[in-house]
Image: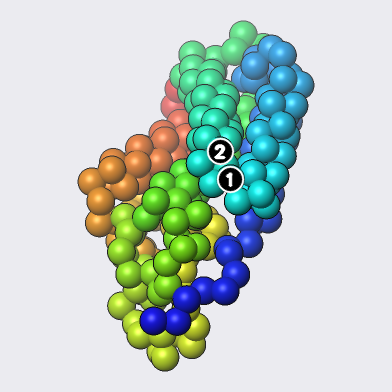
Amino acid sequence: MRQPTESEPRWTAYMAACAIPLLQISLPAPLRPKAIWVLPVVAVLLIVGTFVTHRLRRYRLNEAFGYGLETVLTLSTFFSLFHLVRALVYGTRGEVSGPDLLGSSALLWVANVLIFALWYWRLDAGGPNRRDERGHHRHGAFLFPQMQMTEEEVGEVWRPGFVDYLFLAFNTSTAFSPTDAAPLDRGAKIAMMVQALISLTIIALVAARGVNIL
């Protein structure tokens, strides 16, 4: 079997990881961690660590930096999501205006998509480093359409990249179900359920707020 000659470009994943702290610091003060600059600084250090270790082919260390980065981003995003849901349900006593709450909901909805895209990308089939070592992608937690095609039909040695997982995460948050790629692994199914539930909660509470039900 023909082997891939180049590793997957990582710049799209790095951009997503950089975008999440920027979304966080754009939130109103009651919805974000008090030490506003800690998250961006930590995120940048971890992103630099993942970049350097990948270039040096220190793959175990690269995975450690990657898991650390995504854990930090996940915890900070869930912190803001918790405070957003509480604000939408119980109000903010004037600390955050209605338009700011709606804008914050949109920002955190996007952050939720990016977070889960990064996790899908990091965990599927052993992660990007192990996918780089293989040829045509045949086995993983998700069944992509290209996995059922031959190399001749696809026209290249195909492996999913970050954009494929971003599309998967976007569809999960909008359709609340798999569209392009079906989950095969139980862990992937649970992750997609959690992501869809978070997205549905944000959308439902924003809609309720918009028509003054709450």
Up-down relation of residue 48 to residue 142 (above or below) = above
Q: Is residue 35 left or right of residue 193?
A: right
The amino acid marked with disc number 2 is Leu
Picture quarter with the N terminus: bottom left
Q: Mark 1 points at which residue?
A: 58
Could you say whether the residue bearing mark 2 is in a helix, strand or loop? Answer: helix
Q: Is residue 167 left or right of residue 22?
A: left
Q: Mark 2 points at which residue?
A: 61
31 or 49: nearer the eye? 49
Q: Say which residue appears at 50% left-offset and 54% top-offset.
A: 129
Calculate the distance from the C-alpha at mark 1 to the C-alpha at mark 2. 6 Å
Q: Say which residue appears at 52% left-offset and 25% top-offset.
A: 75
Describe the colour scheme in one phrase.
rainbow
Q: Is residue 62 visible?
A: yes
Q: Is residue 139 left or right of residue 153?
A: left
Up-down relation of residue 153 to residue 108 (above or below) = below
Q: Where is residue 152 in the image (x, y as percent from the top left)?
A: 42, 91
